[in-house]
Amino acid sequence: MLDSRQSELYDDGMNEKLTGDEKQTLLQLARQALESGVRGKSLPPLDPASLTPILLAQGAAFVTLTVHGDLRGCIGALEPYQPLAEDVREHAVAAALEDYRFRPVQEKELVKIEIEISRLTLPVAVNYTDPEDLLTRLHPGVDGVILKDGFRRATFLPQVWDKIPAPAEFLANLCYKMGAAPDTWREKHLDVLVYQVEEFHE
């Protein structure tokens, strides 16, 4: 849980945008963490004196790695549980080494990899009556979407709409990612949550 001060700094609607310098700091931290992790080195402690209050406040982020535009790894947190700067470092390493869809990043690949960071708002539940109603409540290109079915859960960042612009197809692919049949969202009432992101990249 966030205390009142952390909640103000976290700013679940992200009215307080990151500055250009803060974005560059996070990208530099992600790059350093990526290279250290791939080379098997431990990360040095963060220097709080070098970070702004919003980077020290709890925040949730996804780190996406690409090579020439192709996905190479993507891992993140859906809700805040640690300082944003630490969250970015942790998930930069995890995206390189722990994404089950890819083999671990090798040192020779580092020069080719580009880093993208998505800072998340707090997820909000979508209240809907039936599958067709759900389709009308999603905002393509804007909403990140989380599907939950019991213990199973999966998410697509808003950037995925660029490749899957049709809401029905988007949900079908997200069900598949969750380990369910593509038409599960039509066959049963799933828990659906949405969030938005502040995205930036190298």
Image: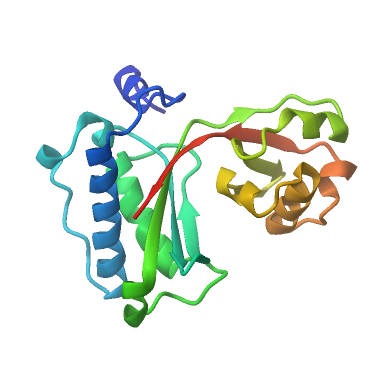
Relative side of 141 to 108, left or right = right
The percent position of residue 163, horizontal first and vertical second, equals: 65, 55
Scheme of image coloration: rainbow
Quarter location, residue 132: top right
Residue 116 visible within the image: yes
Q: Quadrant of the C terminus?
A: bottom left
Q: Residue furthest left?
A: 49
Relative side of 86 to 191, left or right = left
The percent position of residue 38, horizontal first and vertical second, equals: 32, 73
Q: Residue furthest bottom?
A: 108
The percent position of residue 43, horizontal first and vertical second, equals: 21, 61
Q: Nearer the viewer, residue 53 or 118?
A: 118
In this rendering, is residue 182 above or below 197? below
Q: Residue furthest right?
A: 187
Relative side of 29 to 95, left or right = left
Q: Looking at the image, which residue is at 72% across and 44% down? A: 150
Q: Looking at the image, which residue is at 31% across and 74% down? A: 111
In this rendering, is residue 83 above or below 160? above
Q: Quadrant of the N terminus?
A: top left
In this rendering, is residue 6 above or below 66? above
The percent position of residue 62, horizontal first and vertical second, equals: 45, 49
